[in-house]
Amino acid sequence: QVTLRESGPALVKPTQTLTLTCTFSGFSLNTSGMCVNWIRQPPGKALEWLALIDWDDDKYYSTSLKTRLTISKDTSKNQVVLTMTNMDPVDTATYFCARIVAAGLLSDWYFDLWGRGTLVTVSS
Amino acid sequence: SYVLTQPPSVSVAPGQTARITCGGNNIGSKSVHWYQQKPGQAPVVVVYDNSDRPSGIPERFSGSNSGNTATLTISRVEAGDEADYSCQVWDSSSDPWVFGGGTKLTVL
């Protein structure tokens, strides 16, 4: 069974750095085609894609947030870590990790499995 | 950046058909995917590649895509279908994975 689970602090202060961990099972990021993403959703707002890391350790970031984001993987632990620097109250959101199985055209890729998300509140 | 527009809410009586639209410039040329979100649960893909259903998703869920509008259709709506539904595409001119604003489906 494939599962993903997000973990991290529920509350961070403005200007702090957020570190989130996605722990997954049922697949390996050493397997060709496997990708793990981070996606967030502010309360009452739309989903927003943040970052992707693939089996080959290629990394892609949201254009608007790329200066603040770092994504990395630890394949021995089946974990993907996202750090976001200089947190602001507008970054308050539920953060999800989600898998893409890269097959066919890049334009056809979609998120086939998600975690339940973790709510992060940014407040002093 | 590429924008996807969804109605904020759709209401339907049990047993009726719900249609949730997703508008975008020439969206018919893209692959559209639909996700269902229930409170406290992981989002679930209900339709991918415009009209394909993952295993385990009822046949009541279907999708279409043409011109500037993609549509998720839920036939014979049940109380358990009440959720938020979001469309998603890939776009080369902006952040690659783009989501619509989401539509709350209410079963009356």
Image (cartoon, grey):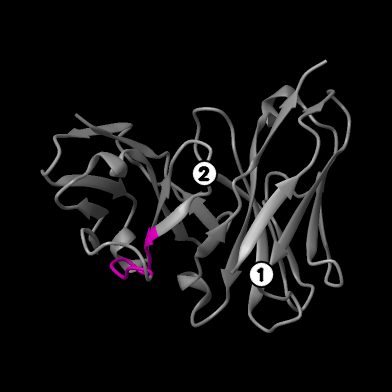
Which chain letter matches label 2? Answer: B
Tell me which segment is drawn in magenta.
Answer: B46-54
Residue A31 sits above or below residue A38 on the image: below
Q: Nearer the viewer, mark 1 or mark 2?
A: 2
Query: Residue A93 at x, y = what percent?
Result: 64, 33
Mark 2, residues whose alpha carbon is within 10 Å: few (<14), some, or many (≥20)?
few
Q: Nearer the viewer, residue B34 or B29?
A: B34
Kindly report the distance in space between the C-alpha atoms of the residues bearing marks 1 and 2. Answer: 21 Å
Q: Which mark is residue A71?
A: none
* Residue located farthest toward the front when viewing the structure as drawn: A1
Query: Residue A1 at x, y = what percent?
Result: 59, 69
Residue at (16, 52) in percent of width and height: B75
Q: Assign the magenta stretch its main secondary structure.
A: loop
Q: Amino acid at mark 2?
A: Gln
Q: Amino acid at mark 1?
A: Cys
Q: Is residue A48 left or right of residue B83?
A: right
Q: Is residue B39 left or right of residue B20?
A: right
Mark 2 secondary-structure assignment: loop
Residue A46 sits above or below residue B74 on the image: above
Q: Nearer the viewer, residue A95 or A86?
A: A95
Mark 1, residues whose alpha carbon is within 10 Å: few (<14), some, or many (≥20)?
many
Which chain letter matches label 1? Answer: A
Residue at (76, 80) in percent of width and height: A30
Residue at (85, 33) in percent of width and height: A86
Query: Residue A49 at x, y = what percent?
Result: 60, 50
Please check the rendered image and state whether residue B51 is part of the magenta-colored stretch, yes or no.
yes
Q: Quadrant of residue B60?
A: bottom left
For label 1, the residue is A35
For label 2, the residue is B41
Please check the rendered image and state whether residue A11 is part of the magenta-colored stretch, yes or no.
no
Residue B87 sits above or below residue B59 on the image: above
